[in-house]
C-alpha cells in the first residue's frame, strides 16, 4: 500500500536540494539539524528508496532523490493552490498586475485562468510594459503587483520567486553565430541581460554589434527565427527551431535569470495576498527563505 507523503517533509527536502546542506536547510526552514535528519529518514521510509547518500562528511542526492525534486515541487504547488482556494472563499476586489510581455506570454495565461476559476469575484487588470516602466508604475501606485526581471532598473524591492538558466540562442538551421562580428538582438539599455551579455563578450574580446533593440520578447524571438541575430533568452522562452549556444561555440556562460514579484506599498488587501500566493505557487521554483539564505 502506497504511503501518503508529508508536505512539510517535502519542503525540507527541497530546501536541502536547493542549498546542498542539511545545516543550511535547517536554518532556512527553522528546524534543528536533528529534526531535519529525522524528517528525511521518514521521507525515505515513505518512498521506500534512499534519496541521500553519504559523500565524505556531506550528503548528496541519489538518482531517486533527483527524481523526487520535480514531484515535490508539483505537490507543494498543488497544496498551496488548494489552500489559497479555500482560505478566503469570499474575496472580492480588483488587482492591477504589471509584467513584461514575455512573462505574460510564457508564464501567466494558464496561471491567470486558474486563478479566475478559483476566485471568480476578483478582477485582474493586466498591463504589459518593460521591467523598468513596470517598476516605476508600482512605485507611483499605478499598479498593485508586478513580475519583473531582477537586475533591471527597478527601484522597488521584491521577492525572487523563479530562477531559470539564461541562454544565448541562434537559429538552428543557420550559422550566424560563427560570423566575425556577431549580430545581437537585445533589450533596451535598462535591461540587465543586455548589460551582462555585452560585458561577457567584451571580456573575451568577441566582436559584436547590437543590430536589434526591443523591450518586446516577441520581437527578439522573431529576429532569431528570421536568422537575423543572436539573442539572450531564458530557458522557458527558447522555441523549437532555435539552437542554444555554449562555450564550445565561443559564447561564455550567462548567469541565471531571476524573476521577481514586487508589490506596491498600498497593496495590502486580501485580494493582493491571494494573487501573490497563487503566482508564487504556480510559477515559483525558488522559495523566498532559501534566496534570503544565500
Image: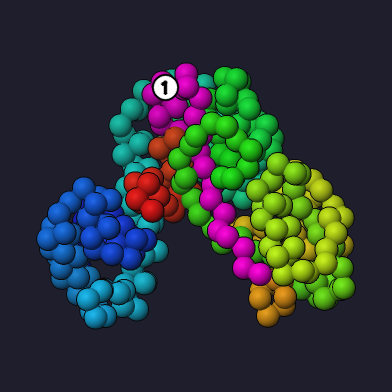
Name the colour scheme: rainbow
Q: Nearer the viewer, residue 78 or 273?
A: 273
Q: Nearer the viewer, residue 136 or 120?
A: 136
Q: Residues within 10 Å of mark 1 (few under 14, many from 20)?
A: few
Mark 1 element type: loop
Q: Position of residue 36 (x, y in %)?
A: 18, 59
User: Taking the image as drawn, is residue 78 in sight?
Assistant: no
Q: Which residue is mark 1?
A: 268
Picture quadrant of residue 82: top left
Where are the magenta residues, as a range?
A: 252-275
Q: Position of residue 148 (x, y in %)?
A: 58, 40
Q: How many marks?
A: 1
- Relative placement, left or right, of 228 versus 61 is right
Instruction: Verify whether residue 15 appears in magenta.
Output: no
At a point 71% along the width and 52% down the height, the residue shown is 194
Q: Nearer the viewer, residue 149 or 76?
A: 149
- Relative placement, left or right, of 239 versus 228 is left
At a point 83% along the width and 63% down the height, the residue shown is 208
- Relative placement, left or right, of 114 versus 126 is left
Q: Position of residue 94 (x, y in %)?
A: 52, 21
Instruction: Verify whether residue 260 appears in magenta.
Output: yes
From this view, report whether residue 251 is shown above or below residue 87: below
- Relative placement, left or right, of 112 versus 177 is left
Amino acid at each position: 500500500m502506497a504511503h501518503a507523503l508529508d508536505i512539510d517533509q517535502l519542503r525540507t527536502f527541497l530546501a536541502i536540494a536547493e542549498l546542498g546542506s542539511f545545516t543550511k536547510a535547517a536554518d532556512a526552514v527553522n528546524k534543528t539539524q536533528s529534526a531535519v535528519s529525522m524528517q528525511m529518514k521518514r521521507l525515505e521510509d515513505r518512498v521506500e528508496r534512499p534519496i541521500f547518500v553519504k559523500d565524505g562528511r556531506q550528503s548528496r542526492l541519489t538518482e531517486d532523490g533527483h527524481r523526487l525534486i520535480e514531484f515535490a515541487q508539483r505537490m507543494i504547488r498543488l497544496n498551496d493552490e488548494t489552500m489559497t482556494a479555500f482560505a478566503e472563499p469570499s474575496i472580492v476586489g480588483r488587482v492591477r498586475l504589471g509584467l513584461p510581455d514575455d512573462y505574460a506570454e510564457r508564464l501567466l495565461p494558464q496561471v491567470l485562468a486558474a486563478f479566475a476559476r478559483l476566485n471568480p469575484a476578483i478582477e485582474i487588470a493586466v498591463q504589459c510594459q518593460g521591467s523598468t516602466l513596470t517598476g516605476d508604475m508600482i512605485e507611483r501606485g499605478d499598479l498593485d503587483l508586478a513580475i519583473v526581471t531582477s537586475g533591471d532598473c527597478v527601484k522597488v524591492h521584491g521577492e525572487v520567486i523563479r530562477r531559470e538558466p539564461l541562454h544565448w540562442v541562434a537559429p538552428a538551421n543557420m550559422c550566424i553565430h560563427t560570423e566575425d562580428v556577431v549580430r545581437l538582438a537585445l533589450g533596451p539599455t535598462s535591461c540587465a541581460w543586455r548589460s551582462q551579455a555585452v560585458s561577457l563578450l567584451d571580456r573575451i574580446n568577441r566582436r559584436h554589434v547590437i543590430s536589434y533593440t526591443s523591450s518586446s520578447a516577441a520581437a527578439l524571438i522573431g529576429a532569431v527565427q528570421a536568422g537575423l541575430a543572436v539573442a539572450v533568452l531564458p530557458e522557458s522562452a527558447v522555441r523549437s527551431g532555435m539552437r542554444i549556444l555554449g562555450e564550445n561555440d565561443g559564447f561564455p556562460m550567462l548567469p541565471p535569470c531571476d524573476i521577481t514579484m514586487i508589490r506596491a506599498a498600498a497593496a495590502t488587501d486580501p485580494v493582493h495576498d491571494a494573487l501573490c500566493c497563487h503566482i508564487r505557487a504556480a510559477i515559483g521554483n525558488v522559495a523566498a527563505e532559501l534566496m534570503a539564505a544565500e
